[in-house]
Amino acid sequence: MLRILRHRVYSHLFGSLVCSLLGSGLATVALGLVAYDIAGADASAVLGAIFTVKMIAYVFVAPLANAAVAHLPRRAVMIGSDVLRLAAALFLPFVGATWQIFVLVFVLQAASATFTPTFQSVVPAVLPDEDDYTNALSLARLAGDLETILSPMLAAVLLLAVPANALFFGTALGFAASALLVLSAALPAGLGLARDDDEEPFFTRARAGVELFFRTPALRPVVALNVTVAAVVSFVLVQTVVVVRSGFGMSQTMVALFLAVNGAGSIATALALPRVLHRAGERSVMLPGAALLCAALVAVGAVLAWARASWAPGAVAVLWLLIGAGWAGVEMPVGRLIPRAVAPERLSAAFAGQFSLSHGCWLVCYPLTGALAAWGLDRTALVMAAVGAVAAVAAGVLWSRGQDDEAER
């Protein structure tokens, strides 16, 4: 997998991704600390609003931004997004009111919603060989999972020497490094966004990426699987702290360890998938991954009914590992499906559509998981597993119909 880093252009792009992820990770830690400094006991409400703003930016800005920059070179779009994120990060240390945080977070996340789909659309053009591209997807997944572990550790080290709001300067450095690496990458000549739709109105271009997923038989199952992932994994991300602290009576450190176990499952799968996908199709990986997600969360619900049993924490840790594995198994192959199903000039719109659709599912499932918690964590797990299972079955049906449509042609 690491051999693709010998590819000079991709190595620069991957370096840009890593710097961007570290910058975003530091910002996440800093936002929590700054929110507490400003809002005190209301910090949790402020953080909840911040994450809602983030998801709204991801869902609505990605397709609009793609339409707005449709005829600009992709290098310019990525560098411009990094510069905008850098500017927002440089202003964040000086905020003194919650509304200022919301505005700057929206700007930062809107820029990220522009950068990420554009970056994703460039990689298949840089790595036309499917095996190389699959390795790149695996490496990107690995980087994302490791960032969730390394960014808090880096923040903890920095906080020994600097105040919390100074972490935003580290965020700015990450985005600056990302922009410089994109600038230094020798992207293929003429690589740009869609050029063949000059006569299309703005809002037609804006909704084109989302419409592709509903019009293209090969991509319709992805819409349903987005629901499965969000339904199951939102339980892990939202309720781990409650399960560990209230359910098991364990320390804050154990909360981090349980989340790390979930990340470890994702990392292990990301490392294995390139070889698996070389021999098997995406469907044979993604549908079992979705089944694993739902079955594991059903098991979580059963375990939580006996949360005080001595074996319960170990059982949940194993299930968190399996959910991490299923999560990567469903999400990572999507990057292979899109370039096959969509014309090159539509790639950026398609990745923006997937970015918007997937985060739309998270925007619904995060608050749903939180609201159901008052009914009991075990019941919440079963309800979210049922939502995920219905979506997974729909994905299987849509995949079969898509294959039938292809056969008829």
Image (cartoon, helix red, strand yellow):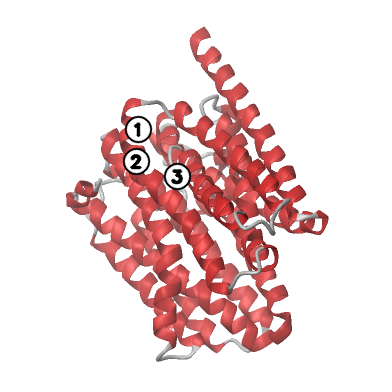
Q: Residue at x 40, y 91 (%)?
A: 161
Distance from label 1 to label 2 (Cα)? 7 Å
Q: Position of residue 83 (x, y in %)?
A: 41, 70
Distance from label 3 to label 1 (Cα)? 27 Å
Residue placed under numbered mark 1 in the picture: 276
Residue placed under numbered mark 2 in the picture: 272
Q: Position of residue 379 (x, y in %)?
A: 77, 48
Q: Nearer the viewer, residue 92 or 276?
A: 276
Residue placed under numbered mark 3 in the picture: 348
Identified by mark 3, the residue type is Ser
Front of the two marks 3 and 2: 2
Q: Residue at x 60, y 29 (%)?
A: 395
Q: Position of residue 5 (x, y in %)?
A: 21, 52
Q: Are marks 1 and 2 in contact (CB under 8 Å)?
A: yes
Q: Nearer the viewer, residue 309 or 336?
A: 309
Q: Is residue 223 above or below residue 265?
A: above
Question: Which of the 4 image quarters holds residue 15?
Answer: bottom left
Q: Residue at x 51, y 26 (%)?
A: 218
Q: Is residue 124 above or below residue 104?
A: above
Q: Residues within 10 Å of mark 1 (few under 14, many from 20)?
A: some
Front of the two marks 3 and 1: 1
Instruction: Give the residue furthest to the front.
Output: 310
> Left or right: where does residue 133 sit relative to residue 78?
left
Badge 2 marks a residue whose secondary structure is: helix
Instruction: Kindly tell me whether residue 139 is visible in this rendering.
Output: yes
